[in-house]
Amino acid sequence: MHEVLRLAYEASADFRGALAERPVGALASLEELRAALSLPLGEAGLDSVQVIQELIQGVEPGLVAEPGPRYFGFVIGGSSEASLAADWLTSAWDQNAGLYAAAPALAVVEETCARWLLELLGLPAASGVGFVTGCQMANFTCLAAARGEMLRRAGWDVEQEGLQGAPRVHVVVGDEVHVTIPRALRFLGLGAGRMVRVPADAQGRMEPAALRKALAGLEGPVIVCAQAGNVNTGALDPMEAIAGACEEKGAWLHVDGAFGLWAAAVPALRSLVKGIERADSWATDAHKWLNVPYDSGLAIVKEARALRAAMTVNAAYLIQQEGSARDAMDWVPEFSRRGRGFPLYAQLRTLGRSGVADLVGGGCALARRAAAGLAAIPGATILNEVALNQVLVRFEPTGGGDADAFTRLVVERVQRDGTCWLSGSVWKGLGVMRFSVSGQATTEADIDRSVAAIAAAAGKGNR
Ligand SMILES: *Cc1c(COP(=O)(O)O)cnc(C)c1O
């Protein structure tokens, strides 16, 4: 047994050790990966050492250096050594986290993480917290609680009666809503096509005056989805004004804060999220900016009872007894699941409050450094206010030409070069390169080296 585990440990250590200098993107093509991995399943089994050896060899060329220091793609984040170590142990311990009876230590670790997180993020201490797979499921879970509670206030028990015949629930979003919100609405029977969209400003922030106007025209239960951290610009909705409008209307305010909610843990950034504690629910990720391995999302609901009512398996125990043990399945959509609180616990303790603030605040400083470096490249324009960890840059070819096509070309060249990895995106109809600083391994030198690689790719011109 130990030989195969040692093999896995050594391959993990080798992979992590080489992250800083290996090409950041995957080396193998789709065809090559299929040729290596898409094997027939044999009738007879194989020796586990051989299987793991071949797995390592087969996947290695298809791995992306995501936990490395120069991965700036999407908004993803890496993973710290402490959280990885706890993640290995989570698998080794193999606890079914759904029930206290099956995983007593995990239940206490998660209730402790919940307390720490609420303190760290400045959210109401009595909130309910569910540990889910990611922010998609956190949005779903929070919106399920919102749907149940808003309909309960309208005299309808959606958990028992379903939506057929229920009063209409209005869902209001900003125009730059993340795609996981309409997807959650589909799962919840609220309909992606029924969202009321409110205009957003040039940075993607919901306009509070437009929200007030939209709310004035709605009757019955209303859920408003605001956003902390636009996936392109990093911009945060003006929470204070939005919360005020929702309170006047009696609307439920949900915040999608997959990465931007972490600004609340940084004293210097706290003004960006002013008023956020007045919301009713918050969805965020630990596997992005907090640098915990996948999968780790957090669904937080101010009225804990509403979260429990939407998720609980056994309605007879709707109210958790004060001081009683926590059955995780009462707080999330899952039944059996892994003990994802362990890596989170390890990461929070390793960082401490100041470490979390340094991680998030430091990422913002590195993003500003990247923006300054990129802005100095001839033909480059920064399209966003770099308030958080995101930079959007667009490239004009020298001598004129199609900037969308040229920006795409620069992105492709940078990806091929392998010094760093970023992706293209579209912002307000314009093609951009999106630079996201979310990994804790990144240093100033990594930013400078990456900016130089991007400058070289843009300097080659458009042919
Ligand atoms: C990433 C992201 C999500 C989805 O989170 P997952 O962890 O990938 O499920 C939702 N909203 C925003 C704003 C995001 O950036």
Image (cartoon, grey):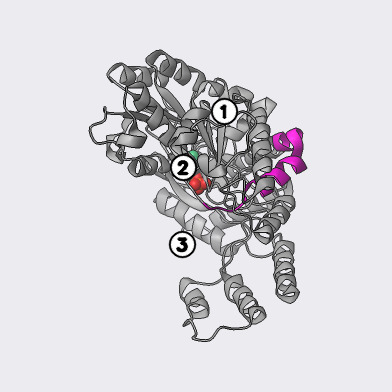
Q: Label 1 amino acid?
A: Ser
Report the residue that reaches farthest toward the front.
Answer: 316
Report the residue that reaches farthest toward the left.
Answer: 165
Q: Earlier in the sequence, mark 3 or mark 2?
A: 2
The 10 Å Cα crowd at callout 3, few under 14, some 14 to 19, many 20 or more, is: few
Q: Label 2 amino acid?
A: Val
Tag 3 residue: 463
Say whether residue 193 is left or right of residue 366: left
**Rendered residue at 47%/71% (across/down):** 30
Q: Nearer the viewer, residue 47 or 225?
A: 47
Q: Nearer the viewer, residue 311 or 417?
A: 311
Which callout, 2 or 1, points to the residue nearer the camera?
A: 2
Q: Give the x, y percent position of residue 88.
A: 69, 59
Q: Secondary structure at mark 1?
A: loop
Tag 2 residue: 313
Q: Is residue 441 above or below residue 228?
A: below
Residue 362 visible to an observer of this rendering = yes
Q: Label 3 amino acid?
A: Arg
Which callout, 1 or 3, points to the residue nearer the camera?
A: 1
In the rendered structure, are the residues bearing label 1 and label 3 in contact, judged by CB atoms less than 8 Å apart? no
Tag 1 residue: 127
The 10 Å Cα crowd at callout 2, few under 14, some 14 to 19, many 20 or more, is: some
Is the CB atom of the residue marked by disc 2 within 8 angstroms of ligand 1's nearest atom?
A: no
Separation of marks 2 and 1 at Cα, in angstroms: 19 Å
Say whether residue 220 is left or right of residue 103: left
